[in-house]
Amino acid sequence: MNKGRLEAFSDGVIAIIITIMVLQLAVPKEPSFAALVPMLPIFLGYLLSFVYVAIYWNNHHHLLTICGNASGGVLWANMHLLFWMSLIPFATAWMGSNPSDALPTALYGVILLLTAVAYEILQIRIVAVHPDAARVRSALGRDFKGRFSPVFYLAAIGLAFVSPVISHGIYAAVALLWIVPDRRLERLHEKDVP
């Protein structure tokens, strides 16, 4: 299958994920700043999740720059990634409504962890079908952010039962780590363009 269909479908699902998240922001009953204060945890959860979804969308775009045609394995790996991403709105809403509770905070981390694992699987599948897989693996090199993010998520999941606030900080720190797009694959693609 041509990667264009894969990109278009993925973009559509990601747009729906963002739409679902924003629709979960309830409008206050009163037109005052005081009415907004109780919504702050929900809004901050939305902001964090929006950043995560944007990071995945951006890096997914960079990853697909090296994808020629999508094999069955690539398609299923992409669906696996989209499945975990589609759970982000639920985890966001639950954590935002219960910011000081351990279980919603831990579940948010589990969803982030499994999304990161799914992204890694997609990357492995795309590299495996690339005609010059060795060169792509070399371009990927040591992926500090990709290797350590799951460790941070695991720590945040465990720490949620000690202090959800610490976990929230870890989730935000990992997002900040990824805010600058991963350009390794884009640079590889730029070398191929005359």
Image (spheres, grey):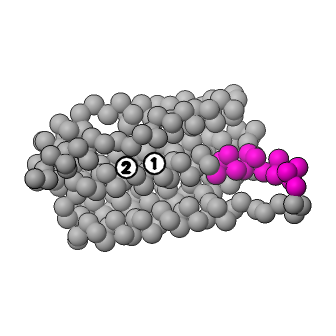
Residue wearing tag 1: 55
The quarter holding residue 80 reads bottom left
* Residue drawn at x 19%, y 61% as measured from the top left: 68
Q: Read off the magenta span.
A: 32-46
Q: Name which residue type carries label 1.
A: Ile
SS for callout 1: helix
Query: Label 1, label 2: how many angstroms apart (C-alpha)?
Result: 6 Å
- Crowding near pointer 2: few (<14 within 10 Å), some, many (20+)? many
* Residue drawn at x 28%, y 56% as measured from the top left: 64
SS for callout 2: helix
* Residue drawn at x 32%, y 67% as measured from the top left: 6
Q: Name which residue type carries label 2.
A: Asn
Query: 66 left or right of 92?
Result: left
Tell whether position 34 is magenta: yes
Q: Residue 65: percent from the left, percent from the top?
A: 25, 55
The quarter holding residue 66 reads bottom left
Q: Which mark is residue 59?
A: 2
* Residue drawn at x 43%, y 51% as measured from the top left: 56
Q: Residue 69: percent from the left, percent from the top?
A: 20, 65
